Image: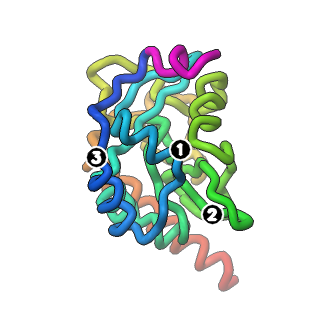
Amino acid sequence: MSMENVLLSFQGRAGASVDDVADAEKALGITLPMDYKQFMMSMDGGDGFIGEGSYLTLWSVRELAEFNADYETALYCPGVVLIGSSGGGEAFGIDRIDGEMKIIRVPFVGMSRSLIEVESTSFEGFLMSIGESSDYETNERGGEELRGKELFQIHPAILGGSPHDPSNVVVLTKEQHVQAVRYWNREIKLLREQETQT
């Protein structure tokens, strides 16, 4: 599958400027991977289906610092910079592992370095990988009405909720999603701390 076909249904924004990318790197305190920067300068994020049906939301470079602060990424996954989501429970990000920048995925709820899974050693490889896979909890309902929103489990699977029960899933705006993720991650952090004390 070619990159053009992978991105056929993805609705991207106008590319970021060199200054936008530089400002993002300064705010985040990291140097972003070159292929990611090149992609963002051609298409500054967006959302839609990728390849065979995986859904992807990519935040613009101007949103990176704000959204990572909102989701408290540094508290739960130090060193990770989140760059977007599956639209349904998983965040995608950039992490330095063994001295090399890699594209990773991690659940929003229960976010922890122990739950990080490496997707690819390159951004293009990441796009191709999710374009060829259906191994994601994606925003399967799709459609314009869900653009810019997230599917969210009312009772998170990590705490025993059903990931397959439609009545356990709601559609949240970005602001609602941030609040829900922050609430559950704080609750899970307390539970984990209690478990280590017993």
Please identify, in this view, whether the residue under mark 3 or under mark 2 is nearer the observer. 3
Residue 96 disc label: 2
Quadrant location of the C terminus in the rendered image: bottom right
Q: Look at 59% across and 60% down and name the residue there.
A: 95
Q: Look at 64% across and 36% down and name the residue there.
A: 125
Residue 110: where, in percent of width, then height? Answer: 55, 58
Q: Residues within 10 Å of mark 2 (few under 14, many from 20)?
A: some
Looking at the rendered structure, the number of numbered marks drawn on it comes to 3
Residue 138 visible from this viewpoint: yes
Q: Which residue type carries mark 3?
A: Ser
Residue 56: where, in percent of width, then height? Answer: 46, 32
Find residue 151 and report its image quarter.
Answer: top left
Q: Which residue type carries mark 1?
A: Asp
Quadrant location of the N terminus in the rendered image: top right
Q: Observer-nearest residue: 141 or 106?
A: 106
Q: Which residue is mark 1?
A: 35
Residue 17 disc label: 3
Counting residues from the start of the chain, the first of labels 3 and 1 encountered is 3
* Region of the chain picked out in magenta, as a range: 1-8
Say which element carries label 3.
loop
Q: Which residue type carries mark 2?
A: Arg
